[in-house]
């Protein structure tokens, strides 16, 4: 019974996380539209290029006027429209990939809760999670943001997605072996 309680909690956590991701998706879209409509609202709000977590970042900045200070170059209302669209699409796809990863993981948790652990669909779900996180890793590893009087290039290598990718593919192989053992067991009975 305790196992089911923990699995129920994990399924609920996946559902809540997916709902939060949808809200983030909507918030990002509202922010994107508002930035297009009222750029002056973001005047003097500096863009932060720091990353959280286990990451290695290589950030290079450039500006047209070398004598001016950074406070007038890297601010929100000075981002070029093309950069805003690219960032919007990049983060939108990233949120979709995270959402799909949680959906696949919730599917695995549900089948384990229903005592249908070693099935081919769980192997495929873990492989899908690995692929989604790999695409997410590639998508979020490189950014170029152009401003009216400069720009920023950022290459970020985050260890967290790499660890999740490795774990997802390891779990896929473990479940694959479980499926094979289950098939052998079913044949002997």
Image (cartoon, rainbow, N blue to C red):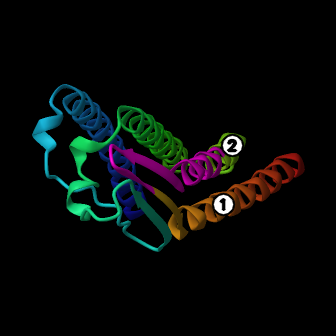
* Vertical arrangement, residue 68 with respect to residue 31, above or below: below
Quarter assignment of residue 73: bottom left
Instruction: From this view, report whether residue 55 is shown above or below residue 174.
Output: below
Which residues lie in the magenta part? 128-152
Of mark 1 and mark 2, the one earlier in the sequence is: 2
The secondary structure type at the circle numbered 1 is helix
Q: Nearer the viewer, residue 75 or 72?
A: 72
For residue 171, the mark is 1
Q: Position of residue 68 (x, y in %)?
A: 25, 62
Mark pair 1, 2: CA separation: 10 Å
In terms of depth relative to the viewer, which is nearer, 22 or 52?
52
Residue 134, given in percent of the width and then of the height, sits at 62, 52
Name the residue that disc number 2 marks.
124
Q: Residue at x 88, y 46 (%)?
A: 187
Q: Residue at x 36, y 41 (%)?
A: 18
Apparent side of residue 163 relative to residue 187 in the rendered image (left or right): left
Horizontal and vertical percent for residue 45?
16, 52
Residue 32, image quadrant: top left
Q: Is residue 85 left or right of residue 111?
A: left
């Amino acid at each position: 019974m305790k196992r089911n309680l923990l699995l129920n909690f994990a399924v609920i956590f996946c559902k809540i996380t997916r709902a939060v991701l949808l809200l983030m998706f909507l918030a990002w879209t509202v922010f994107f539209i508002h930035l297009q409509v009222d750029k002056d609202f973001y005047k003097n709000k500096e863009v932060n290029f720091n990353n959280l977590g286990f990451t290695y970042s290589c950030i290079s900045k450039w500006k047209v006027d070398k004598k001016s200070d950074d406070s007038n170059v890297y601010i929100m209302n000075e981002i070029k429209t093309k950069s805003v669209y690219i960032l919007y699409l990049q983060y939108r796809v990233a949120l979709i990939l995270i959402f799909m990863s949680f959906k696949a993981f919730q599917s695995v948790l549900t089948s384990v809760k229903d005592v249908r652990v070693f099935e081919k669909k769980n192997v495929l779900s873990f492989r899908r999670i690995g692929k989604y996180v790999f695409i997410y890793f590639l998508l979020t590893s490189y950014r170029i943001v152009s401003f009216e009087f400069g720009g920023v290039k950022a290459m970020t290598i985050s260890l967290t997605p790499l660890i999740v990718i490795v774990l997802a593919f390891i779990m896929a192989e473990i479940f694959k072996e479980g499926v094979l053992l289950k098939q052998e067991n079913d044949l002997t009975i």
